[in-house]
Amino acid sequence: MDNEILVVTRNFPPLVGGMERLMGRVVEVLQREYLCNLVGPVGCGAHIEPPGRAWECPPAPVSAFLFCALAKSAMNVAGRNYRFCLAGSGVTAPIAAFVRVFRKIPAISFVHGLDLIADSCLYQAVFIPALRKMDIVIANSRNTARLAVAKGIAPDRIEVLCPGVAIPCLTPQARNDFLISYNLVGKKILLSVGRLVARKGLVEFLRHSFPQVLRENPDTVLVVIGAEPEKSIRKDRDVRREIEGVIREAGFSDNVRLLGAVAEETLGAAYQAADLFVFPAREITGDVEGFGMVATEAASYGLPTVAFAVGGVADAVKHGQSGFLVPGEDYRQFSEVTIRFLKTGLNGVAPERCREFAESFSWDKFGVRLLEIISRLCPPDPR
């Protein structure tokens, strides 16, 4: 068929995470205009509409996925007339680069931040040159675009496209049920959502900011939703164990709830029940917060965010509208802003303004922008 495309990505459902949700949405958008074939992790085929096909590979170890994905990509491009090949991240960019040369078709890759600065000589020697060969590189934030330029990717080939967010209908009953279920009625609730990895900064927040918050607001409870990644490329320290250690040492057992991974309905209820979203992400060598989808997700529920202005977070939080940005690692100011909001609120930051900001990231707008970017390189043929 003349309108077929090939998507190669390890970051895809049923794997869980922000990048996986993003790539799921990308394929959903592309299937409106193109016949999508996908090389992805085991279970990905459930998301491909016939007559598109999926070729599944074991997601771990990463080397096994890459060898499998390369083999399956090479086999299925030989007899097909693809319009372009899209890599879900820098990890699969070498496969897209191979298809580009082998079939003489355009290649596109998303980049998310970590896939540009990964602390590996092999990665930097093999994967970054492949990204430089892409016809278009789609960065998830302005900061990621700056990282891409620093890695030698031509600025005129880089497009910034921030991830989208769904705008939910609010359900007061779900909020009330959440408060009752977790014994939070009458409490001031700080919420943290995301994978338990070092760059999210929860251990340091508990050590350096939370004690001051509790001194001023003893009825505050930090609710933490998220688990440690099971199949992540980057090996991280045991963050949950460190968090549990700080809770024991500081006597925070009554003021911290570690809920782990939860259902979407519970997550939505938590966003509605919370008073403030805290996002103390850190700058770490070899790791970066590429965007901060959880901050726009919080805003979609009318929940403001206090965050460190690191990585791509400045694109995900509108200072003075959807929250407040604090200089990185300034835990004293982070505490002060949090305390002030819990007591009196922040000027200009209100639920309706948070939702207004989130609407600028709607998935519908994301889809329109994605198709605009791709169509400049490779417009779809009428079906």
Image (spheres, rainbow, N blue to C red):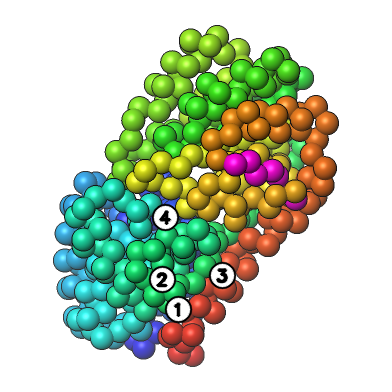
> Would you say residue 378 is visible in this rendering?
yes
Residue type (three-letter) at the residue carrying disc 4: Gly
Q: Which dot marks residue 137?
A: 2
Q: Which dot marks residue 272?
A: none
Quarter occupied by residue 211 = top right
Q: CB atoms at circles 4 and 2 under 8 Å apart?
A: no
Residue 323 belongs to the span the image colors magenta = yes
From this view, report whether residue 308 is shown above or below residue 111. above
Residue 212, position as x, y percentages in the image = 65, 19
Q: Which dot marks residue 367?
A: 3
Lower sequence index among marks 3 and 1: 1
Residue 154, position as x, y percentages in the image = 39, 75
Residue 189, position as x, y percentages in the image = 68, 27
Residue type (three-letter) at the residue carrying disc 2: Val
The residue shown at (41%, 36%) is 197
Q: Which residue is mark 4?
A: 113
Q: Which residues are magenta?
A: 321-327
Circle 2 crowding by C-alpha within 10 Å: few under 14, some 14–19, many from 20: many
From this view, report whether residue 23 is shown above or below residue 201. below
Q: CA distance from mark 1 to mark 2?
A: 9 Å
Determine the secondary structure under disc 3: helix
The residue shown at (58%, 46%) is 309
Q: CA distance from mark 3 to mark 1?
A: 21 Å
